[in-house]
Image: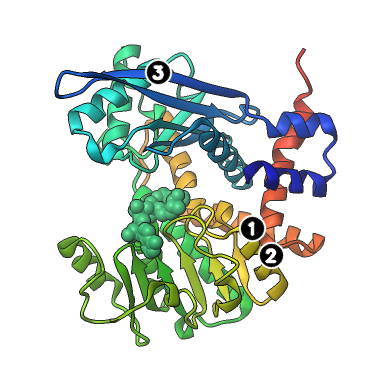
Amino acid sequence: MAATQFDLVADFLGLNDELRQRTKWPKRLITVTVPIRHDDGSVKVYFGHRVQHHLTRGPVKGGLRYHPKVDLGEVAALAMWMNWKCALMDLPYGGGKGGITCDPRTMSMGELERLTRRYTMEMIPFIGDDIDIMAPDMGTNEQTMAWIVDTYSTHAGRLIPGIVTGKPLSLQGSAGRTQATGHGVAFLACRALNKLGIKLTEATAVVQGFGNVGSHAAYGLANSGLKVTGISDVSGAIWNPAGIDTRKLRDHVVLRGSITGFTEADPIDPAALLCQPCDILVPAATDMTITAENAPHLKCKVLAEGANGPTTPEADKVIDARGDIFLIPDILCNAGGVTVSYFEWVQNLQRFQWTEREVLTKLETMLETAFARVLVFAERNKLSNRMAAQSLAVKMVADVKAQRGLFP
Ligand code: NAD
C-alpha cells in the first residue's frame, strides 16, 4: 500500500526514474536475532528489525513496535510513512521504524527488559542521537524507552537522553508529549471547521477510540466548545446528543478500564456510531475502519484521521467522489506526536526543558503552517487533501536528494 501510494504521487510529480528509485527504496534494512533468557531458564531467539528509510534530511525518527505480527515488510512500510510525515512537518528527519516479533502481553517485565536491552545492544552500530532516534509504538512505552536510554548510555559511558523520545519526564522527556497527538487532532479539526464557516460552539464531534489519541482529541474538542456526542472503544460505543462529559468519562475509564457502563450516555452500536450525524468524525483507534461499505453513509463534515491509515483506498475514492467531506489526512492530522518528539529531542540536545505551554504553542504554529501549505497545494493542483499532503512530502525529499546530488 505504501509503495502503491508512492507510485501515484511520483506519477503526479513527474519524478524521473533516477529520483523515483532513490526516493522510494529504504536506505538501510536491518534484521537482528535477539536471544534472551526467559524466567523459566529457557532461551528463546526473537527477530528484531529496524528500517531507516533515508538519511538525506537528517537522522531517522520512528517508533519501536512489539507485536506478534511484526515483519520486515510492515516495518519498511511504516518507515516510509514516517518519512513523509516528518517531511510534511518540515522536521529535519528521515523516517524510521523498528519492531520485534513477540507478544509482549505474555512476557514478564524482566523478559521485556532483557529483550529491549539486547535489541538495543544489537542496534548500537546503527543508531545514535544524530543517526536514528526511536520512540514508543504499539506494545512499547515510557519504560521501554528508559531501558534503551540506560543501555545506550551505559555503553557510551555518559547519559545520552536524545537516543529516544517518549521518555518519562524524570528522564528528560518533554512536557506535553502525552497529549500532543490528540491535541493536534483537535486543533486541526477546529481549523477545518473555521474554514467551513461552522461555529465551534454549535458543532458536534464523534470520536472512535478512547486511548491516548482519542481521549486527548475528545478533551481538546470539548475544551474548544464542541459537544462530543459519541465515543467508542474496543468494548463498545456510547451516545448522548446533549454532549458527553469527557473528564467524567476519563474518571470512569480509570476506574472501570473501559467506557462500558458509563451512565451519562446510552449504548449504541459501534458501527452505527461512525454514521451518526456530526460535524467532526475522528477515527482514533485502528487502521481500516472507514471502508467502501460505511463511507457512503458517513454524515460528518470533517474527517480528522487521528489513527494511522484509518481510511482504506476504496473508501478514499468514495469520499473523493462525494466531495462533501473535508478530510484531514493522517500524516498531517496525527503529526502532533512526532512534532513534540522532535521538540523533546531538541530540548535534550539543548539540555533545557520547555514548559507545556511553550511546547503546545510551538506545536500549534507548526501544524497551522503545514495545514495551510496542504490546503493551498490541494486547491492549486485540484487534488484531494491526502494526495496534496503526500505530494508535498515526497517532493520535499526528492528535491533535497536532487540538490545534494549523487555520491560518488
Ligand atoms: P491506544 O492503544 O492508547 O488506544 C487505542 C484505543 O482504540 C483504545 O481506546 C481501544 O479500546 C480503542 N479501540 C481498539 N479497537 C477498537 C475498535 N474496533 N473500535 C473502537 N475502538 C477501538 O492507542 P493510541 O496511541 O491512541 O493510537 C491510536 C491510533 O493513533 C493508532 O492508529 C496509532 O498508530 C495512531 N497514532 C498514535 C500516536 C500517539 O502519539 N499515540 C501518534 C500518531 C498516530
Q: How far apart are marks 1 and 2 (CA)?
A: 7 Å
Q: Nearer the viewer, residue 103 or 109?
A: 103
Residue found 82% across the figure and 29% down from its top: 18
| Residue 33: image tag | 3
Disc 1 marks which amino acid?
Pro
Quadrant containing ligand 1 reads bottom left
Residue found 52% across the figure and 82% down from its top: 199
Residue found 49% across the figure and 78% down from its top: 275
Q: Can you give x and y, in whole percent of width and height, for residue 297 in the image? A: 56, 78
Q: Can you give x and y, in whole percent of width and height, for residue 160 in the image? A: 36, 23
Q: Would you say the residues marked 1 and 2 are in contact, meaning their CB atoms lie under 8 Å apart?
A: yes
Q: In this view, does 238 lie above or below 174?
A: below
Q: Residues within 10 Å of mark 1 (few under 14, many from 20)?
A: some
Q: Would you say the residues marked 3 and 1 are in contact, meaning their CB atoms lie under 8 Å apart?
A: no
Disc 3 marks which amino acid?
Thr
Q: In this view, does 378 lie above or below 75?
A: below
Q: Is residue 161 above or below residue 378?
A: above
Q: How far apart are marks 3 and 2 (CA)?
A: 41 Å
Quarter-of-image position of residue 402: top right
Question: Quick one: label 3 or label 2, which is nearer the N terminus?
Answer: 3
Q: How far apart are marks 3 and 1 (CA)?
A: 35 Å
Secondary structure type for disc 1: helix
| Residue 317: image tag | 2
Q: Residues within 10 Å of mark 3 (few under 14, many from 20)?
A: some
Q: How crowded is mark 2: few (under 14 residues within 10 Å), some or many (20 or more)?
A: few
Quarter-of-image position of residue 353: top left
Query: Can the viewer see residue 216?
Result: no
Tell whether 330 sits left or right of 112: right
